[in-house]
Amino acid sequence: MEEAYLLALLTLDATLRVATPLILAAMAGLFSERSGVIDIGLEGKMLAAAFAAAATAAATGSAWAGLVVAILVSVALALLHGFACITHRGNQVVSGVAINVIASGLTVVLGIAWFHQGGRTPTLDADFRFTEHALPFAEAARSIPVIGSVYAEVISGHNFLVYLALAMVPLTWWVVYRTRFGLRLRAVGENPAAVDTAGISVARLRYSAMAIAGLLCGIAGAYLSTAHSAAFVRDMTAGKGYMALAAMIFGKWKPVPTLFACLLFGFLDALAVRLQGVELPVIGTFPVQLIQALPYILTVVLLAGFIGKAVAPKASGTPYVKERT
């Protein structure tokens, strides 16, 4: 019984670690899509940021420098996506896919050219990474039944970026639902013509949303290579950008439900790792691929209308063309 309880705590601890990039990328997608711009390029921005963070940290010996460069690279790609889709009214899905393809290829090419390690960056020492820190009174709390062990094993012992990702959820909620910018952002995603008629620049709002999305994707990418791992490896995002989009849709474009979707997907991912090679009664070796596919299956079920209705912002994916008088 005690072993099962410890295993449950370790799985929940791993859930937070795995869900962190999903939370950041999902919040990024939420800002983008709330403004009316579909952002399939979350995956590419995270991947490029992960490479930039690891390469910079390896060169400078500073994880913070890596984080800054990762954000700059990700924001640049986000603005490039905006330039194609907002200024030139290009196809948003095609532009996002192009960013993913560019990031996937360019990171490997630059990695081989700069570090000569088959596309990966050098392994980072602990001093060059975001390392785990215990929260106050974590050790003393272990003696408290249930609550103490959850605090010590699950909540405490993470790096700065994990807590930053969790803090981004209420911050996103406040910005989207309690600020003038958030009101305009939601309006431009629903009816950009009305926003334009009110004398507010649709393009400026959408570019602002893209910049915020780039910022969050940059943090997510830096987390992958300088916190969760100790180096960049080829395609290390492994579909997390697409999973973040699925979580955002599953959360119906709302911050708090999206957080729970990310935690659910992170839990399934952590559980799949725990169940690899485990023999279960009757079933035998559990097919972990089924668990890994569940986030996408659940999203399709949601979109089919079996567990509620997911309605995207009305202007999402539609370039705005200013009416001429």
Image (cartoon, rainbow, N blue to C red):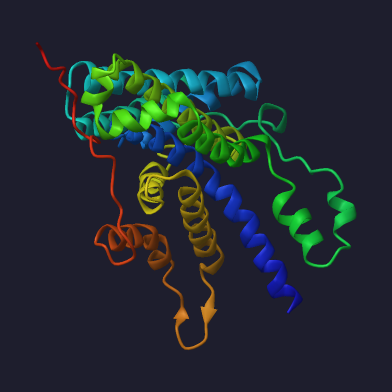
* The residue positioned farthest toward the left in the image shown: 325
Residue 226, horizontal then vertical, whole percent: 59, 33
Residue 237, horizontal then vertical, whole percent: 43, 41
Residue 207, horizontal then vertical, whole percent: 35, 19
Q: Is residue 293 visible?
A: yes
Q: Is residue 35 visible?
A: no
Work out whether residue 292 or residue 203 is closer to the camera in this orientation and state it: 203
Residue depicted at x 76% and y 55%: 151
The image quadrant of residue 122 is top right
Residue depicted at x 61% and y 54%: 14
Residue depicted at x 87% and y 52%: 139
The image quadrant of residue 128 is top right
Work out whether residue 211 or residue 110 is closer to the camera in this orientation and state it: 211
Work out whether residue 58 or residue 257 is closer to the camera in this orientation and state it: 257
The quarter of the rendered structure image containing the C terminus is top left
Counting every numbered tag in the picture gives: 0
Residue 189, horizontal then vertical, whole percent: 29, 32
- Image vertical order of residue 197 relative to residue 258, above or below: above
